[in-house]
């Protein structure tokens, strides 16, 4: 982790909605994803017609974008917090690793909320098994680079069945932009972050930031019963279950998520 805040100005950003909107929302995509994964959400009626400006920003380094020097999750949270402040965003929505960055923005004092967390991970044991295996293999000298090269090539093919037919070509093309060497290092830092805190439930609870934890009913990322109980007992956390949705909940059910984001943004 950096001893001093890193300055970063190479964000890949896509904005939509009224330029003069009184409320702005920062959207952080997940790992290996780009702003394109929020296109369906931005176009969904509850948001498309709302007085809300959406600022989608690819997590630096993912989907072939420029990475920061420090790939630690705490640094990403600080960078995203600075971006939210610079753009005047009053709400942060994050998906997957982007959700964990949003969580850390709140826990680290970089953002006072509210935050909408789409399919976050609260402990290493909850993570998708394929990603866990890739992280383990990535740490083995001699085969780590090869393992990640294969994973980045394979991911778009595996994801095809999980994407709506009309969006498959565009979204798999975004996955293909990823640099295996970057992904290997970024995911290593991500798992180190999860191991450092054990469970992120107390970290979110103790932040006091209003948070919505959103999960599809067939998400590949797990949630332990004690974690669920801790979240449900947290006065600042609202749990939201989305039917007929997997890990890419905002792609599977964009209208449902758009309605939630609009409601949070407009109070």
Image (spheres, rainbow, N blue to C red):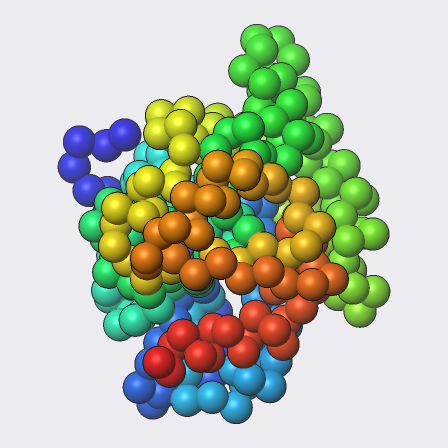
Q: Position of residue 52 (x, y in %)?
A: 41, 83
Residue 48, position as x, y percentages in the image: 54, 85
> Residue 136 appears in which quarter of the rendering?
top right
Q: Residue furthest top?
A: 141
Q: Residue 247 versus residue 75: which sits nearer the camera? A: 247
Say if 198 sits above or below 246 in the image: above
Q: Foreground: 28 or 200?
A: 200
The image shows residue 194, relative to residue 144, as above or below, that is: below
From what the image shows, is residue 169 above or below residue 182? below
Q: Is residue 227 visible?
A: yes
Q: Which percent across, then down, holds residue 164?
A: 78, 64
Q: Position of residue 156 (x, y in %)?
A: 75, 46
Number of marks in picture: 0
Q: Residue at x 49, y 58 (%)?
A: 239
At 40% across and 74% down in the image, what residue appears?
Answer: 264
Asked whether, in this view, residue 52 is left or right of residue 74, the answer is right
Return the residue found at the far left: 4
């Amino acid at each position: 982790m950096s001893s001093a805040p890193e300055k970063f100005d190479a964000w890949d950003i896509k904005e939509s909605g009224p330029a003069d909107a009184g409320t702005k929302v920062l959207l952080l995509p997940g790992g290996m994803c780009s702003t394109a994964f929020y296109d369906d959400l931005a176009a969904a009626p509850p948001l498309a017609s709302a007085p809300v400006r959406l600022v989608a920003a690819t997590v630096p380094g993912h989907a072939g974008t420029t990475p920061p020097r420090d790939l630690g999750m705490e640094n990403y949270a600080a960078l995203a917090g600075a971006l939210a402040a610079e753009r005047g965003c009053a709400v942060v929505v994050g998906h997957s690793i982007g959700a964990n960055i949003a969580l850390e923005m709140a826990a680290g004092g970089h953002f006072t909320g509210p935050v909408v967390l789409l399919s976050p991970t609260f402990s290493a044991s909850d993570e998708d098994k394929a990603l866990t295996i890739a992280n383990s293999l990535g740490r083995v000298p001699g085969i780590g680079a090869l393992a990640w090269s294969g994973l980045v090539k394979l991911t778009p093919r595996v994801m095809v069945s999980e994407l709506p037919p009309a969006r498959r070509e565009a979204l798999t093309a975004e996955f293909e932009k990823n640099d295996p060497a970057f992904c290997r290092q970024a995911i290593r830092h991500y798992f180190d972050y999860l191991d450092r805190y054990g469970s992120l439930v107390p970290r979110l609870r103790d932040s006091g930031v209003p948070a919505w934890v959103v999960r599809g009913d067939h998400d590949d990322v797990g949630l332990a019963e004690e974690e669920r109980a801790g979240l449900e007992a947290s006065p600042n956390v609202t749990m939201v279950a989305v039917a007929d949705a997997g890990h890419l909940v905002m792609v599977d059910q964009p209208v449902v998520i758009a309605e939630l984001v609009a409601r949070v943004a407009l109070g």
